[in-house]
Amino acid sequence: MNELMEAVRKGRAHLVPRLLEPLGPAERKEVLAELKKFRTELRGWSWQQWEQRSRAAIAVLVAGAGCQPGAVSAATWIGAADLRIGRPVPVRPVLDVLAHRDGVWLGKVAHRLAGRANLTEDDIQLIDALVERSGCAVPTADGYVTGWVGTTARRGSRATGALWQDPRAAVLAVRIFELPRIPGTILWEGFREPGDPWPAGLAALAEHGVVKRSELLDACVARILRGGKPAEMTFCLAVLRALDPGDEERRARIPDWLGMAADGTPMVASYAQKTLTELDRRGELPDDALVAMSEAVLFRREKALVRAQLVLVDRALKRTPGSAERLLPVVGEAFGQADTGIQDRALKLVARHLGDVGDAVREDLALAADRLSPARREEARALLGVYGMPDDEPYEEVLPPVTAPGAVAPAPGSVAELVEEVLVVMRSRELTVDFERVVDGMVRHGAEDRGALAAALREAMPNHWWAGDPDDASAFSHYQERYFRQNDGDIDFLVAAVATRLPFDLRILGADGKDPGACPHEALSGLLSARLREVAYRLRMDPPPFLLATPTRDTGALDPGVLVERLREYGRLGAVPGPVDFGQALLRVRRGAGGPAAEDAAALGTAEGDRLAAWLRGEGPELPALRTPGGRPGPDQDQETAEDRDGTASTENAENAAEPSARDRGRVAQAVLNPLRDARDLLVMRRTYPRSFHWLGRAVRPHRRCRQFGRWRPFWRLVLPYEREALAVWLQAGLAMSGEGENRGITAGLISLAEAESGDGPAGPGLHRALAIGLGAERSEDRLAAVDALLSLAARGQLDHARLARELVDLVDHGVVIPTRAADALDTAASSGAYGTVWSVLGPALPRLMRSVPVNRGLGRVVAVAAECAERSRPAVAEEIPGLAEFAGRKGTSQVVVQAARLARALSATTSPAVPVPTDTMDRMTT
């Protein structure tokens, strides 16, 4: 036994079967007891011994499998996660130590192992070997099916094509469709077409008689009806097409096709619609089924499906006019479609077959007509003979409610509460106001009793990856030391600094920090790192009573009166403010706010009080890093004029043009003085602020080499709560890449900036340009975030509609924003009830858009959104939109011509009395 345990300790798993073979049940029981003790010891080995630990763990797995008396305990031992540390299961040694077991026992082990999740290829090999040796049935557990699919997929398309030769496929093929999720390994190769490896391979099982065709078809159809991710549905549809159901099979599954047409993905619904259409063409689709199909499909939002269904209904009504009483009311579902072209088709269909129905159906259609666009609503009422119901209700804009900034809760009151919230922040990795509260709580409780706080943290996370001897800095590995040197802007860093002794001097980057370079995103992360370094160092050497920079509102803002009281309490206690902590506190107070807090701060008689007073009065050095083009002009900086915006200038005679004007001389003087002023401000910044703030004294811009480029970090707004214009400008370059499908999720920053602290009046040009870029993002979810930001600004009264229109047109002209994407985003905003807001943006933009956007590049879609908004909001237009009459007067039925005419009618209706519907409406609509 000693020789066996020695081999196990040295990780020599290949020797274990030979050493274990001569041992009897009693001796194996003793070995198992020793193995359990050694397994417990292994868990305490440090990460520096990872290589030795992993080899020894595998040897323990092999030896324990041969010593376990029961099949269940053996399977549990083999599947233990702590015995598989980065190494595959040695299949041959495990089989060797189980060679003395009977078939029933081995079969139980195989089925028990098959029930585990996340099986590896080695697990599948072991289970297959146990099944073959025991002669038991093939396991059908979810984990084994997923593992079998993965093993087959890794062998390539040849193995998939020869699936019918795999004896396990007879049992497992149908189980693929019964899993909670289709295995992702199926989706590695081509899976969208019937001839792709997996669809063709599964269909071949039915061709060769390995699986009953009806079973495979039923399982595939049931999986589609159950729903799932789009890729899963695409795969199941490809299998269904590869099976190619025959006529009898299609007739027997009419309810299934109806379910797919109603709730399936667009591809699935299209397949089901074509199948049902073919049955209807043959006269094999019952009327009840056609009605149910029409009700479902006409409610969908896919235009192609709805148009095809209207054609099918029209054909059915022409064939059997008597079915109009049941089918024509269903067409009213299409009246609610957003696309006016579909509304026109549905209305014309109703007009053609209206003579085949009675008054009850007419009344139902009249009620459904309320969902039509305003212009078509009047035509429908005249068609249906319903009068006296004009739309006299005034338009009411619907915008989201405005939420006021919330107050930040105080720091956790006890060590137990603090530790609980620390664990929550560590798991979420979110740097929100809760993170600020937790850091402040660690300072407060650390100042009272750092030893008690450190003990509570160690007790709450004894097995954390950095946990070790709290007083032995050498216990840290090289990897751990390098991690904390590079990731000091992390809650783990502060917790480790409090609970243990880090193996480097915290003063290296403590109060001074490091110069983050020219990228503002790196600089903002550097500020966070400097704060945590300073807190960690001071908790060790000179604990402050609390932090000065903890915000008072969830936007990151800090009330100046609260900061004055905190400084007063510092003075009473004789505490020294941390330079980084106080610098961050200043950035969280509105500069130039004035008020009584400025006088109270000056009355403190401290250097920090004087700096706070100057900050509140708007004095002291300017911050060039936060100066944005057109954002905050200084007292000597010219405001943007209408002439500058339009690129025109007043023309004078030649003599006056040759002589510089007073404005030109002022601009030259500013060009000379501004660099001198910036140099002065930078020198003042270096004298009064820690090094981690020096970047604020010079102009900065994001660069693509920055690790933060193309991302939005919510804590940026907490660092600079009153500088949303600067944050928006820094975000623009990353937002522009979202139009190419990159930087997914970056538009979430627009919502945060729209809800940020701001003064009175509209948002600045930087935020409007960022918003315009976000409206043209490639992904619909990114555009939806930009729409939320647009509506939030409008609800707050901070949206400059004309500026957003100019920015949007400029971006379209330069190819940054694709018109159809912006139109989709604005249509989403309008459909939420903000038709007036969207019109106020599109209205000023239309003249330039109609000049610059080609007809085949989305102009029709833009004009359609504008027409919808004009019909709904009924704006008062003082003059005709240039270029609109030209498009509206063209011949043809292209979208831009139809929608331009619709817009012209809507605008004329807002400035003139209502035009009565012509008496020949019926004749025109039935043509």
Image (cartoon, helix red, strand yellow):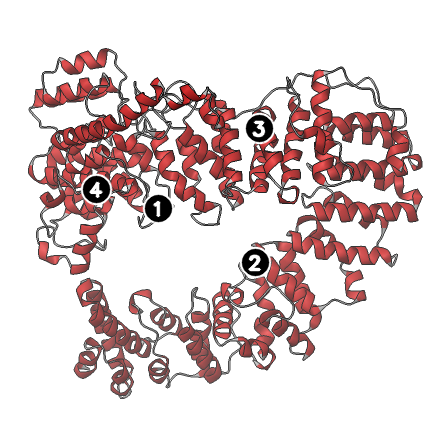
- The relative height of residue 33 versus residue 355 in the rendered view (above or below) is below
Inter-mark Cα distance, 4 to 2: 42 Å
Give residue 786's position: percent from left, percent from top: 49, 36
Q: For the residue marked with disc 2, what is the amino acid? A: Ala
Q: For the residue marked with disc 3, what is the amino acid? A: Val
Label placed on residue 709? 1
Label 3 sits on residue: 838
Label placed on residue 481? none
Please rate how many residues cluster around mark 3, counting C-alpha atoms within 10 Å: few if below 14, some from 14 to 19, many from 20: many
Camera-side residue: 398 or 454?
398
Q: In front: mark 4 or mark 3?
A: 3
Give residue 21's position: percent from left, percent from top: 29, 87
Label placed on residue 529? 4
Any part of residue 293 in sight: no
- The relative height of residue 802 versus residue 490 in the rendered view (above or below) is above
Instruction: Answer with the quarter of the image where residue 831 lies.
Output: top right
Inter-mark Cα distance, 2 to 3: 35 Å
